[in-house]
Each structure stands twice: as C-alpha cells, then as structure tokens.
Image (cartoon, coloured by chain):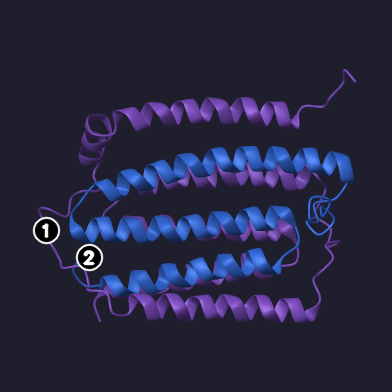
C-alpha cells in the first residue's frame, strides 16, 4: 500500500491539526474539571505533534520527528507533575473544580 | 479517489469526533476513554505519514502510560459521578465562540503559505528507526541526556507533591 504522502496534500494535515488544536482550546475554556483541562492540553500537544510529523515527512527532514520525540518526553513529565499537583489539591479542598481555587486571584 | 485519501478521511473524522467527545462528555471516565481512541487514530496518521517509530512510541507513551495515569487519577479521586458543576450558559457560548474565532484566525493566517513540495520517495524514508536513531544519537545527544534529567526531576517532584505530610 502506498503511503499518504503521494496522494494526500499537506494542507489537509494543516487543516486537521488546526481544528484539533482549536478543540483543545475550546475544552480548556469550557470545562471546570482540572483533569479534563489537562486532557485538553494533551490534545493540543498532539495536534502540534501531528503537524510537525507531517511537515517532516513531506519535506524529507528527520529533525521534526526528533522534536516530536522531545515533545512527548516533556508531555509525559508534565502529566506526571500535573496529576500529582491535582491529587495534592484534592486532598486539601476535596474538589478538582478550578473555580474554587481563586485565592491567588488578586 | 485513491485508497490512502479514503483512509485519511476516515482517520481524520475519527480523530475529530473523538476529540469533540473528550470535550463534551459529562463523565470524566468517558473523556479518558475517548482520548485513548483519539491517540490511537493519531498513531494511525503517523503510520500513514511513514513515521513508524513515532507511531509505536506514541501508542506506548500516550495510550500505555499517560492515559493509565489519567484513568488511575480519575478513579482515585472518585470523580466518576456526574457531579461537576457547569459554567453558566453565557460563558459556554463565549468559549465556543472564541474557539471558533481562533480557528478562523489560524486558517486565515496559514491560507497564504506555500505548500510543502513533495520529495523523491527515497528521501521520504525519514521516519524509519534507523534514520531517527542516527539523528537522535548523533546530533541530539545532549538534549537526549537532558531529557533523562528532566524525567528524574519530574519523578522526584511528583513523589514529593503527592506524598502526605505526616510530620507536622
């Protein structure tokens, strides 16, 4: 089976990852549960990953895929620290609603 | 229509639908499960783009490690009941509107960019393990080692943050 580089234009991947990124932004703005917000951040990171891989494959340059590898590393570390923070917050205020945590607002 | 275009359309529709269900499903457990499906379809996109190494790493890291961590936390915090209070309707409307506006702005900004030209097929084998490994261990050795230090500090930080404070 031929790969999609020959027959699918690169603009389609650009459109797809832009739409995915905007869904992630919308989720961050829409939801109040902190876990869902972390998941939407993962969605945005994956949209950027997809765009980097498509550019790297179309241009024949491997450095984009190395960058995607490092983005995955940073995302894994971010999720570990973020979920630990969330567990610690839940232990103190017994909720993951981000509108409760307004003590540092002013 | 070529078969790879059909596969692209199916994968893209699946990705976008599961991403929308992540945002709009009420129960956090369902959100996590839809996000796992979304990551699998992105791995399918990577396979279609000839990035086999990244597809395998994506499945292992995201669907294997990160989503298990999310699911474990959702179940640990007992959030599987639909108890989340929702934002007022005006704020929801504003959030959807600003997401759509951002989409329009990005599309308008990238519409005039030049499309990337196709390369010869022997050059498009950049996603194979051999080429990625060459690049990673020859040109990016220092960032690779710094990434391990980042993992170590993230591990220590999460253990310190999630530990109960018993001594005071």
Of residues B29 and B88, the one drawn nearer to the viewer in this rendering = B88
Q: Tag on residue B19? A: none
Q: Tag on residue A5? A: 2
The image position of residue B93, as x and y in percent, is 70, 81
Q: Tag on residue B121? A: 1
Q: Is residue A36 left or right of residue B20?
A: right
Chain where mark 2 sits: A
The image position of residue B100, as x and y in percent, is 55, 80
The image position of residue B40, as x and y in percent, is 47, 56
The quarter holding residue A33 reads bottom right
On-image quarter of the C terminus of chain A: bottom right
Do marks 1 and 2 share a subunit? Answer: no
Residue ranking furthest to the front: A106
> What colour is chain B?
purple
Taking the spot 69% from the left edge, 60% from the top edge, the residue there is B30
Q: Classify 10 Å Cα crowding around label 1: few (below 14), some (14-19), many (20 and above).
A: few
Q: Is residue B100 left or right of residue A37?
A: left
Disc 2 element? loop
| Residue A57, placed above or below residue B14 | above
Chain where mark 1 sits: B
Calculate the distance from the C-alpha at mark 1 to the C-alpha at mark 2.
Answer: 9 Å
Chain coloured blue: A
The image position of residue B153, as x and y in percent, is 56, 27
């Amino acid at each position: 089976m031929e790969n999609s580089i020959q027959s699918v234009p690169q603009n389609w991947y650009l459109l797809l990852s832009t739409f995915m990124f905007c869904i992630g932004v919308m989720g961050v703005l829409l939801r109040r549960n902190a876990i869902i917000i972390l998941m939407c951040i993962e969605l945005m990171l994956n949209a950027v990953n997809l765009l980097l891989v498509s550019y790297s494959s179309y241009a024949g340059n491997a450095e984009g895929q190395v960058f995607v590898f490092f983005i995955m590393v940073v995302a894994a570390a971010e999720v570990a620290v973020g979920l630990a923070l969330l567990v610690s917050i839940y232990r103190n205020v017994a909720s993951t609603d981000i509108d409760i945590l307004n003590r540092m607002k002013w | 229509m070529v078969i790879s275009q059909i596969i692209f359309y199916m994968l893209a529709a699946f990705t976008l639908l599961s991403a929308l269900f992540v945002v709009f499903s009420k129960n956090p457990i369902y959100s996590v499960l839809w996000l796992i499906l979304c990551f699998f379809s992105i791995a399918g996109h990577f396979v279609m783009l000839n990035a086999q190494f990244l597809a395998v790493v994506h499945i292992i890291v995201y669907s294997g490690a990160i989503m298990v961590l999310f699911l474990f936390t959702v179940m640990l915090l007992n959030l599987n009941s639909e108890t989340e209070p929702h934002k007022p309707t005006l704020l929801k409307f504003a959030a959807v509107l600003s997401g759509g506006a951002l989409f329009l702005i990005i599309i308008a900004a990238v519409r005039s960019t030049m499309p990337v030209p196709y390369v010869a097929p022997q050059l498009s084998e950049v996603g194979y393990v051999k080429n990625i490994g060459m690049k990673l261990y020859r040109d990016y050795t220092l960032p690779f080692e710094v990434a391990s230090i980042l993992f170590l500090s993230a591990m220590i930080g999460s253990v310190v943050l999630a530990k109960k404070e018993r001594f005071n």
